[in-house]
Amino acid sequence: VTRHYLGLRNASVLATRDLLLTGRAISDLIKTEAMGAVVGPAGLGKTFAIEHAIERRGEPVISLTFEARPTMRLVADRLLHKLTGAPGGGTRFAMTDQLLNRLSDRRRLIVIGEAQNLNRDCFEYLRHLHDDPSTRFALLFDGGDGCWEVLAREPMLRSRIYRRVAFGRLSDSDVLALLPGYHPIYADVDPELLVLINDKAANGRLRSWAAFTHTASGICRGIGAERIDTTIVRNAISQLGNAR
Amino acid sequence: VSPSVDVIVDRHDDIATVWALRELAAREPGVLAVSMAPRSEAEPAVVWAILRALGKRIEQLDRTKVKVWWMDAERWVVAHRVSEIVVLCAQHLGDRVTEELKEHVCGRLRIALMLVYGGPARTAPPATTTLDGYLAQQHRPPSAHVRCRPWPQVPRSHPLRLRYDCRQQLTPEEFARVERLLVGSLRTMGGRWWPVGYVARPEIRSGLCVVGAAEDPEQAYVRRCAAELALICDQSPIPLVPPLALRPRLLTTEDIDAIRAYVDPAAAGYQLAKRITGLRDGLVALIGGDQITDSAILGCIVPEPVRPILRAVDDRSEPVLQVPDMAAPEPIIDTTPPEEEVAVALGRLLQRRNARIRPRKLPPQLRSRFQALRADGILDRSYGAYRASHIALYSSFMRDEPPTGSL
């Protein structure tokens, strides 16, 4: 089961448009063994949506996240480690050869987190692995701010991105339609209150909604309330530092 | 005229370009598509890219640190009868290695080269053609490669005068070829004794069977004579053996992939020969390069996907396969007395130029055999003793020059 931010309990998965599109995109990418990208600012639920889509599928998935400016060798080494359980050895050619062989045995999905950290050589290297006619894997770039700009700057990637999901913030209408079903503390609450939370604490970001819900549900538990009211909301916003 | 070096520049580095060229390579048997990894600026990177495109896999080899050179790429490209090489992502090649690639592929192998530059490559030269233009043009068929030429007709002489008779009857070029085969087969059969000094009778029979096998009857006769000559020189009786009849084994796709993975043709050839013929290592070790044809090993037909290995293996008339270390053969268990005595007596005459045997010292049952050999010009009678004739000494490589005058 996909873990909510901060381990929030009793929360449902919000069937946002972007979450549904991500599920569909991943399904298509795996089917066609193509490249795709899930991009958008931090905190909008990209990684959650990817994990949620992946857990319902049977194909093996490799998730990798790299620090800023990794080398090709590091990419090869990490990927080989994930595939074989042992660190890569030998020359870069030997590692590439092993990777090409391992990535040929069955269909799988490789998710590269924080893809904006990769440089051109790394993109080229992943492209080299993906373009090989023997390999069978879908490649999904998951990136935050600036990711799409980085991907779009590389012409060899632009023509290869088969599915792209650009995550956006939740609008007030999204909040009113979806949030009452997110957690029991929002059931039957005043819509104005939800809009207020979105405006003052969440700003359309699902990660902020999860943080608020985690705080507010704690307050509710403390005072024995079943759902939020204006006082609890203000209290929670104060605890969160009125973050926007 | 050197084959052409063409350039396609794909500014958008479109996946459709890669697909189209890979489809072309899959469709045209003479076209090989090679994809370059980023920073392929040194010889090993390019050589490995070519070898990988031809089915070589480092991972399936025993060790990962395998050094490769241009000659490896050249040997396999020729063996696969490649006539055009398409280099995808040529922008990853350095200037120096690009020049080396042109020199080896176009200059030495006379193979056309298509360099495909993708993206905003800083070093891309001007395009000489377009993708559509290249796809539409007529592509060169696989280059011709004939491993085996027919063997000249050789006289059906005794092993102890075959070399001499061949020298008398064949042209110098034909004789040189037959002599190489004689020497190679002689060394192959005789070489089995060198490490241990003895070999078991069943080993002799199976060895003779393998060394004497060939698809061409002339070649088979020369090989058989050379193997018998080795036995004669070693004072071993010559057993009667039927011609080698092997039933080729079927290869699975996994077998084929595993065999194709080897970079060293001798190692790949051993794996292939072992699996297709079913022979044990001791006999695979006897297979000479001339016993491997364009399509078969010892008459066992090889599937098309692994035939390039046959073309890559040396064609010398000596063992060419890299066989793992083997256990020493068992000693001789028994021999047939009369044949043993003939073998010992004849072998003794061939050990030194002036070796002699007095007829009265020969057992009665051998005298008629020696008289027949004398009538054949293989033995001389001198001062009442038998000795090996000049023909026999020349034919068993004890003398360099043949006797003058015909016999």
Image: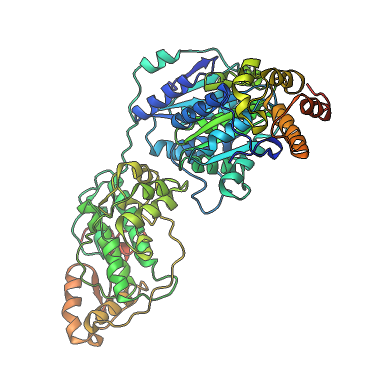
Image point (28%, 68%), residue name: B206
Q: Position of residue B213 (x, y in %)?
A: 25, 58
Q: Quadrant of the N terminus of chain A?
A: top right
Tell which of B242 and B27 is nearer to you.
Answer: B27
Q: Is residue A174 rendered to the left or right of residue A210?
A: left
Name the image colouring. rainbow
Q: Position of residue B231 (x, y in %)?
A: 31, 70
Tell which of A63 and B91 is nearer to you.
Answer: A63
Task: Confirm whether residue B46 shows in the render.
Answer: no
Q: Is residue B166 rendered to the left or right of residue B12?
A: left
Please determine whether, in this image, residue A58 is positioned above or below residue B121.
below
Please determine whether, in this image, residue B202 is positioned above or below residue B18.
below
Q: Position of residue B338 (x, y in %)?
A: 22, 82
Q: How many callouts does the rendering have?
A: 0
Image point (45%, 32%), residue name: A133
Task: Confirm whether residue B282 shows in the render.
Answer: yes
Question: For residue A9, which quarter of the picture?
Answer: top right
